[in-house]
Image (cartoon, coloured by chain):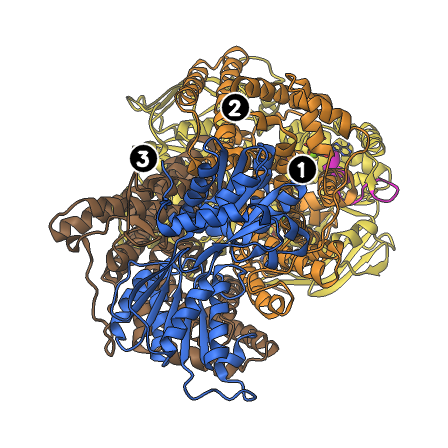
């Protein structure tokens, strides 16, 4: 009986995302038809290209980056804190970490550790600021992180100057930090056959972070307190949780993970923070966290899906099909997946109540009438 | 999951019942005081732009889209729905506003279309949050993504076919001619040019507010008292607000909570869309991809800043618009002068804390802050460009850090509501 | 049926059936209410009283059955239909927006208007004053609801109904939060209403009240009407038996177990509002091992704040000592770990994570203790095992420990909380309304557990609105009023009426 | 996909000439139709297409993307048989360096960057500072109030080059001239290239602050500068293309000149070289000497000072005047 229940429960968990993807494909089909493109052909191109070995590596690499970002957002969400500031946190963290990493030469593991540590610290501090403002001054973290994003941009632009952390690249209009030497770089992995391109070594760290997140949430007291606060702040307070400390702690942790967002790119590909360092990953992270229901495994799937769509969109351009339809598709997936989750949740809840009712009725005496 | 925000205020406490009521005389006195202060700082620093006609005019122009987005946020949140999708609805407003303005050759068609475009976004949000009970933030984020993709797609399909348009921009939109309050322009300008302390400052501020103002700006400003009037003076408004405070209570008195929420969120989208249309039609005269630049989020911030009230929200967006205009116009000098202003204000706050509230420690901390700011002012003579640009954001953050505890949001904002479920 | 006198009842319900997922809340309910009567409806928790009333008020739609008002069949699609038919309802839980004024709350949905849109505030104010004066409600239309006490809120609710010109009033447990004097005032108003031709439907768990005010009483058990009786021809005991189908439990302590060892001492405890007004004012008391100290008081007189201060949830001045240790500066968690248990007043807000399984709710508040935790880790299997034990020992009716707390009925939720708080081997237990809204069976079980723990040397601070419970379960009884302990009374020879008058401050200083 | 479908899929009415190359072009953010520097590249491409009967495939970057995505774009073109491949914008520097190595038989051109070197990479560079020097001089000559302004879109080294040349040119004419500068946003917020509202406010501030000529290097925000100039009855200077031709009719008359950065010429010249098999690897600097940068005379507003400007131009070409490409401080 228990196993039957679990199987059904697992099936229900899958229903929502599948429903959402079907809906998204449907809506995209309509858009494609309207603009006169052949939907089947379009999806065919995407799948074809998306599953080539090299694209799969790219998808995995981008997903690694997305994963950290979504994890950072999810940590906050689990406590009903909305960290819109992951974007600013990771940019500032990557910049300063890149400068530090570029300035030193150390034995390989130490060098990488130092750089990553700096990133984690900077991310944690920047997010912690929002946490402190909320805990001590009651400033909504939604606003403070929006503002801190812009402030991080200004600060970053000021720091990324040849008088400060940047070095000019001769012959280039780009400007960046001093490249991190080989000892500070994280080698890639040959995970997928059929291509020379390597998967970021950071994929391992991402997996570990996911496991750590799961473990932290479910097996530690801190995680319990965090989830309890997210579910009911008043009950958490009554149970002895110091909500102010939790707010600061959660924001710091979220920011620490946000600090990792730039690391796969920095230590696995560009080795320097320059003007073209990827931006906006923090916002993508929000969408993916929501897609994955703030659950480490769900986020992994969400990140892969998002990354697959983003990467396979490249092929559409080649065939003169608007790649914007992929953005529309991503948005529709987020929206429809949550609608589907909500419907499933309602169904589950009433099923559970029914179950409790039945069990109780079985033990109770029959009633007249 | 429901993202409703954890409140860090002393847990389980009863919220402060005392509310200060701002009356017209007090507001006017406060504003006049502010101008006096600005005049003093202007004279002391020579940063003439602080009270110039152009700065005031630009401030209003910068404040309007933020204020409209904020009004959008206000309508939604007063009915209990968080609207983080304002940015997306604003994006829809810029696109549809520009498209209709060009297609019909009439900017006012753009105004209407911008509002409609935003309203469609609002309708989607209402559908997701009210009918399907989706978490408000999730829905908002999704709408931002979809709107971004949709306008990119539409531009590619439609603007590329238009003369002067492209994948990332529309053709030039026909202009709405600005209007001026007659007769006072010349005399005020004469006064303003005299550079007399205070008198010229007042003259310039008045000029900035009354001369060369777009009728669309006037419309936007009118929407503030109109919103107040509708929400606080009419039966419709009372019912709408009751949905944000205690929807079950409203339902138990026969108010159809769902439909009020729907109306509120659609109106919210329309306001955000108007903000977008303003940006495209008046502020820029053209649609450019990404031109909203996060103003929807800032509008949301202005609304919270304004304590979920139209007056406060107008103040919040004006503050933001003013500092943004200053930094864009003569950033280094003006922002540097603002440091002195902040320092003076902090001294004032410290004195208030000491004399009226007897909070000695707080007063000392504030005074130290004032001194620090003053030192920074004294030892530098300009503010680096990279820093001037986040002046409005920093100011917002600082003001909130001082005043956040006094804010009070509608009691049921962000909470899911299902007819007949909760108690 | 007993009643067939008048031909045309004000309300007639026939064969009402209402199903919720997993429960049939009402089955085949039949009820006739004569015009000009006070008609009481009694029944256990979850018997389906509120659901029935909501159906009559158009907030729920019956699955089957017929409603007749003044003889004519009606179908209500929403409360507005019911309001139009002259029905008004005061809900079990207040239906007021705290951030609105009384006026706004009252006129909502039927606003007097000028030109069809603008609210005519002065007309509304006038009307409210008139009604308030006519029925002696003493309500100020311009005060903010959040600043009102429970009694005032109750009157606002009644005003809301009268304002709409209702002829048929439904009052769902209006007296649960009132002291006897306020109840008397309420009943006086009700009698006035009835004289003017209003009809009142009235729900209460307090059988004495029901017997004193009602013209007729209908008993509901497990969703169906069992019998309609005349108060003159029945007793509280008989009613209870009809409700439960068994005998009524009595709260009482047998022999004294009070020792000389002080377990909890509170001295000069003062809690202030953000504005600086004291809500708990210089409160001092001691509880010894094996003693139950009852605190009596009208709701909103500082009890909740007192409990929060003792639990460290709310900052306070004064000292609190646990055995010999000064715990004043301690965090809530440290207090809990050191043996202070807490049954909170509002189990949904402060006692449970509704959307979490029972075993996680077992951990709540005991995150650092065995068997829930090992060092910084949560011990899932330990917690699960212990939850199963609690479910078993405290007779929590549930199909398993993996269902969400929200799926349990209130009484079972409360039993889980009591079991949890007793499991930490507490030295002191702060019990706020431990049996509020719990039906008689569960009530008896909770009292038994309290008695047993007391016998083992537990010190209990008992706060309750149920005066019988307070008198019966306390070794020592103190009265709190306006945040101050104003009197100590002897629980062995005080009547609920005397206690009630002491609570309103009528009895003078002790 | 709308406007460039025919070019890629082949227009049946215009049979492709047998010698026609398959050109791959990767744009920076904004792509074709940005009315700025991507558009200029597109013009060069279009010219080559008609002239040499080539076909082309054009791909566009997305905001905030990673290097890997840029690389992939280039690879898609290279593997799709496109040769040569042109990358527009310095952000393609590393991707080009990498992908060019993978495809030694494909010729790559990289606009605005010479950090990426390789035997099959042609770097197309511009002396924006030299052109800006001339319009700076023009601004100083035209300014009656001895006060001018510069509005940059985003504060990046590329735009600083414009500012440096502009300031040097103005100071060369009037050493005591007052120059106001404003960048609309800071990297990585590139919205400064897309926010005409900000451009307008910044320029208004300058006009109110006494300037009467403002030079903009602000991409799509430049329209706002023109509007402000119109309202202030002052002058503006355009950038990249001859904006007195391309800008909206209502503001054309305030644009006294434009600093021309002839990306189209560079792209066309490269393609022409490819067609004639004479492409050279390494840097080609499009400066005043080769006419890669210049100032425009449309509208006749600088006719009166044309002689002076041309003289300066000659001095720069001859090396007599050295124009700085970096701002000081
Ligand atoms: N009685 C009124 N009639 C019309 N418009 C008004 C009225 N009072 C204020 N307004 C306008 O509406 C805006 C609302 O501002 P705000 O909400 O701060 O008012 P308030 O005085 O705080 O309101 P309340 O009276 O509810 O406290 C004001 O800025 C003003 O423009
Ligand atoms: N909206 C609902 N959804 C599901 N079940 C419900 C709902 N409302 C009530 N119930 C269930 O219906 C039954 C009757 O509830 P009701 O509130 O009518 O009881 P009651 O007699 O008023 O109890 P109390 O004395 O505690 O107020 C209970 O089992 C309750 O859990
Ligand atoms: Mg108001
Ligand atoms: Mg009930």
Q: Mark 1 points at which residue?
A: B310
Q: Does the magenta portion include A214?
A: no
Residue at horizontal 31 percent and vertical 56 percent from the top: A214
Residue at horizontal 43 percent and vertical 22 percent from the top: B377
Span colored in magenta: C94-117
Give SS at disc 2: loop
Which secondary structure is most common in the magenta stretch? loop
Q: Residues within 10 Å of mark 1 (few under 14, many from 20)?
A: many
Do the residues indicated by labels 3 and 1 lie within the same chain of the protein?
no
Q: Quadrant of residue B108?
A: bottom right
User: Which of the two marks, 3 or 1, is nearer to us in this view?
Assistant: 1
Q: Are the residues flagged by discs 2 and 3 in contact, CB closer than 8 Å?
A: no
How far across and how far down the image is residue D34, in percent? Answer: 53, 61
- Left or right for B76, reference A292: right
Give SS at disc 3: loop
Q: Name the residue under label 2.
A: C274
């Amino acid at each position: 009986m228990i196993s039957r229940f679990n199987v059904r429960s697992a099936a229900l968990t899958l229903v929502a995302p599948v429903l959402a993807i079907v809906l998204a494909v449907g809506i995209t089909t309509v858009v494609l038809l309207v603009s006169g493109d052949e939907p089947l052909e379009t999806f065919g191109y995407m799948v074809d290209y998306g599953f080539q070995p090299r694209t799969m590596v790219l998808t995995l690499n981008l997903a690694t980056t997305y994963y950290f970002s979504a994890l950072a957002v999810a940590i906050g969400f689990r406590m009903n804190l909305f960290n819109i500031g992951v974007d600013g946190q990771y940019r500032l963290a990557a910049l300063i970490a890149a400068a530090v990493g570029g300035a030193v030469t150390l034995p390989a593991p130490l060098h990488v550790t130092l750089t990553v540590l700096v990133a984690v610290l900077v991310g944690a501090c920047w997010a912690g600021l929002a946490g402190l403002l909320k805990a001590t001054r009651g400033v909504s973290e939604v606003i403070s992180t929006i503002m801190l994003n812009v402030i991080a941009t200004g600060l970053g632009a000021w720091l990324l100057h040849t008088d400060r952390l940047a070095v000019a690249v001769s012959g280039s209009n780009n400007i960046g930090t001093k490249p991190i030497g080989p000892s500070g770089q994280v080698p890639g992995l040959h995970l997928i056959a059929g291509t020379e391109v390597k998967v970021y070594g950071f994929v391992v760290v991402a997996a570990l972070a996911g496991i750590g997140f799961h473990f932290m949430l479910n097996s530690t007291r801190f995680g319990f307190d965090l989830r309890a606060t997210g579910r009911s702040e008043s009950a958490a307070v009554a149970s002895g949780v110091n909500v102010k400390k939790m707010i600061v702690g959660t924001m710091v942790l979220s920011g620490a993970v946000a600090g990792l967002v730039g690391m796969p790119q920095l230590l696995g590909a560009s080795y320097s923070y320059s003007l073209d360092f990827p931006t906006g990953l923090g916002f993508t992270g929000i969408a993916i966290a929501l897609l994955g229901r703030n659950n480490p495994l769900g986020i992994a799937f969400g990140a892969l899906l998002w990354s697959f769509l983003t990467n396979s969109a490249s092929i559409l351009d080649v065939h003169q099909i608007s790649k914007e339809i992929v953005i529309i598709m991503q948005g529709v997936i987020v929206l429809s997946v949550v609608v589907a989750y909500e419907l499933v949740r309602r169904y589950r809840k009433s099923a559970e109540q029914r179950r409790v009712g039945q069990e109780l009725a079985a033990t109770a005496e029959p009633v007249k009438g | 999951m429901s993202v409703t925000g954890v409140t860090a205020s002393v847990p389980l406490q009863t919220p402060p019942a005392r509310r200060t009521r701002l009356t017209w005389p007090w507001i006017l006195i406060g504003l006049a005081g502010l101008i006096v202060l600005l005049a003093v700082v202007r004279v002391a620093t020579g940063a003439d732009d602080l009270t110039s006609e152009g700065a005031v005019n630009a401030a209003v122009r910068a404040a309007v889209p933020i204020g409209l987005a904020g009004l959008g946020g206000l309508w939604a949140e007063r009915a209990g729905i968080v609207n983080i999708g304002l940015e997306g609805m604003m994006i829809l407003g810029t696109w549809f506003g520009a498209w209709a303005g060009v297609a019909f050759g009439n900017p006012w068609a753009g105004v209407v279309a911008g509002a409609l475009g935003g309203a469609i976004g609002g309708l989607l949000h209402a559908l997701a949050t009210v009918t399907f009970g989706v978490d408000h933030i999730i829905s908002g984020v999704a709408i931002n993504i979809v709107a971004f993709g949709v306008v990119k797609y539409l531009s590619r399909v439609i603007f590329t076919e238009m003369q002067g348009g492209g994948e990332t921009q529309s053709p030039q939109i026909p202009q709405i001619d600005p209007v001026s309050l007659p007769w006072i322009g010349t005399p005020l300008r004469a006064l303003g040019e005299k550079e007399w302390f205070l008198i010229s400052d007042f003259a310039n501020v008045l000029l900035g507010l009354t001369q060369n103002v777009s009728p669309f700006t006037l419309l936007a400003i009118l929407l503030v008292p109109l919103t107040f009037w509708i929400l606080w003076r009419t039966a419709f408004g009372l019912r709408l607000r009751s949905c944000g405070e205690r929807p079950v209570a409203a339902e138990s008195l026969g108010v159809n909570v769902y439909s009020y929420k729907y109306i509120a969120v659609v109106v919210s989208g329309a306001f955000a869309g108007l903000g977008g249309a303003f940006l495209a039609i008046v502020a820029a005269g053209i649609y450019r991809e990404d031109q909203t630049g996060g103003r929807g989020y800032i509008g949301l911030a202005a609304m919270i800043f304004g304590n979920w009230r139209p007056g406060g929200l107008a103040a919040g967006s004006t503050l933001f618009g003013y500092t943004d205009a200053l930094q864009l116009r003569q950033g280094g000098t003006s922002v540097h002068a603002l440091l002195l202003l902040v320092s003076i204000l902090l001294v004032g706050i410290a004195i208030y804390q000491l004399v009226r509230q007897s909070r000695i420690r707080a007063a000392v901390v504030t005074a130290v802050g004032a001194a620090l700011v003053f030192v920074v002012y004294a030892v530098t003579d300009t503010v680096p460009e990279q820093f001037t640009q986040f002046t409005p954001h920093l100011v917002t953050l600082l003001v909130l850090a001082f005043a956040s505890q006094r804010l009070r949001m509608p009691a049921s904002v962000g909470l899911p509501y299902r007819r007949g479920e909760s108690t | 049926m007993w009643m067939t006198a008048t031909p045309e009842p004000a309300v007639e319900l026939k064969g009402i059936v209402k199903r919720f997922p997993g429960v049939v809340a009402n089955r085949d309910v039949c009820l006739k209410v004569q015009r000009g009567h006070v008609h009481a409806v009694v029944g256990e928790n979850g018997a389906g009283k509120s659901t029935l009333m909501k159906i009559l008020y158009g907030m729920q739609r019956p699955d089957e059955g017929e409603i007749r008002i003044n003889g004519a069949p009606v179908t209500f699609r929403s409360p507005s239909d019911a309001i139009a038919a002259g029905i008004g309802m005061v809900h079990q839980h207040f239906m007021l927006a705290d951030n609105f004024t009384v006026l706004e709350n009252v006129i909502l949905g039927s606003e007097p208007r000028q030109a069809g849109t603008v609210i005519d505030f002065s007309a509304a104010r006038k009307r409210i004053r008139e009604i308030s004066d006519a029925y002696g409600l003493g309500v100020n239309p311009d005060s903010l609801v959040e600043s009102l006490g429970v009694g005032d809120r109750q009157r606002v609710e009644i005003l809301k109904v009268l304002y709409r010109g209702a002829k048929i009033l439904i009052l769902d447990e209006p007296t649960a939060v009132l002291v006897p004097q306020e109840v008397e005032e309420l009943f006086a108003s009700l009698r006035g209403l009835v004289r003017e031709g209003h009809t009142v439907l009235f729900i209460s768990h307090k059988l004495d009240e029901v017997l004193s005010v009602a013209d007729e009483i209908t008993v509901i058990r497990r969703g169906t009407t069992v019998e309609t009786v005349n108060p003159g021809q029945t007793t509280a005991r008989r009613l209870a038996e009809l409700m439960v189908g068994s005998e009524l439990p009595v709260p009482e302590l047998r022999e004294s177990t009070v020792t000389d060892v002080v377990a909890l001492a509170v001295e000069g405890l003062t809690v202030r509002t953000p504005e600086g007004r004291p809500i708990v004012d210089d409160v001092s008391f001691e509880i010894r091992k094996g003693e139950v100290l009852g605190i009596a008081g009208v709701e909103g007189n500082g009890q909740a704040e007192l409990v929060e201060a003792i639990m460290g949830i709310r900052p306070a001045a004064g000292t609190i000592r646990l055995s010999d240790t000064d715990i004043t500066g301690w965090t809530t968690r440290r207090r809990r770990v050191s043996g202070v248990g807490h049954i909170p007043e509002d189990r949904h807000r402060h006692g449970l994570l509704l959307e979490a399984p029972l075993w996680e709710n077992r951990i709540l508040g005991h995150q650092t203790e065995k068997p829930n935790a090992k060092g910084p880790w949560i011990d899932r299997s330990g917690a699960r095992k212990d939850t199963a034990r609690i479910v078993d020992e405290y007779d929590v009716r549930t199909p398993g420990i993996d269902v969400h707390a929200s799926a349990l009925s209130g009484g079972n939720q409360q039993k889980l909380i009591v079991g949890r708080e007793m499991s930490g081997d507490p030295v002191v237990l702060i019990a706020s309304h431990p049996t509020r809204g719990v039906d008689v069976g569960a009530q008896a079980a909770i009292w038994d557990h309290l008695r047993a723990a007391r016998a083992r040397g537990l010190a209990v601070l008992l706060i309750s609105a149920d005066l019988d419970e307070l008198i019966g379960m306390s070794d020592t009884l103190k009265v709190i009023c306006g945040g101050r302990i104003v009197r100590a009374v002897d629980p062995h020879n005080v009547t609920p009426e005397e206690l009630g008058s002491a609570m309103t401050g009528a009895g003078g200083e002790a | 996909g709308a406007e460039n479908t025919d070019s890629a899929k082949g227009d049946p009415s215009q049979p492709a000439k047998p010698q026609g190359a398959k050109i791959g072009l990767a744009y920076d953010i904004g792509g074709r139709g940005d009315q700025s520097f991507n558009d200029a590249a597109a013009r060069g491409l279009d010219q080559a297409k008609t002239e040499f009967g080539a076909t082309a495939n054009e791909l566009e970057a997305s905001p905030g993307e990673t290097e890997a995505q840029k690389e992939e774009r280039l690879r898609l073109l290279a593997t799709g048989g496109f040769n040569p491949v042109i990358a527009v914008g310095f952000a393609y520097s590393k991707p080009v360096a990498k992908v060019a190595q993978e495809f030694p038989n494909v010729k790559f051109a990289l606009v605005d960057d010479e950090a990426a070197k390789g035997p099959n990479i042609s770097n197309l560079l511009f002396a924006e500072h030299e052109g800006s020097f001339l319009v700076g001089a023009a601004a100083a000559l035209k300014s009656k109030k001895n006060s001018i302004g510069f509005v940059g879109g985003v504060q990046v080294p590329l735009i600083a080059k414009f500012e440096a040349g502009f300031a040097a040119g103005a100071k060369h004419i009037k050493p005591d001239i007052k120059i106001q500068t404003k960048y609309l946003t800071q990297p990585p917020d590139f919205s400064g290239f897309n926010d005409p509202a900000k451009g307008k406010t910044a320029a208004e501030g300058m006009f109110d602050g006494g300037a009467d000529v403002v030079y903009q290097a602000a991409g799509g925000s430049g329209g706002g500068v023109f509007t402000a100039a119109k309202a202030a009855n002052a002058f503006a200077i355009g950038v990249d293309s001859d904006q007195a031709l391309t800008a909206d009719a209502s503001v054309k008359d305030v644009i006294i000149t434009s600093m021309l950065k002839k990306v189209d010429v560079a792209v066309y010249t490269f393609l022409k070289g490819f067609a004639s098999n004479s492409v050279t690897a390494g840097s080609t600097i499009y400066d005043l000497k080769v006419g890669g940068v210049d100032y425009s005379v449309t509208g006749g507003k600088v006719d009166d000072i044309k002689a002076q400007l041309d003289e300066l131009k000659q001095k720069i070409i001859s090396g007599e005047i050295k124009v700085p490409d970096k701002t000081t401080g």
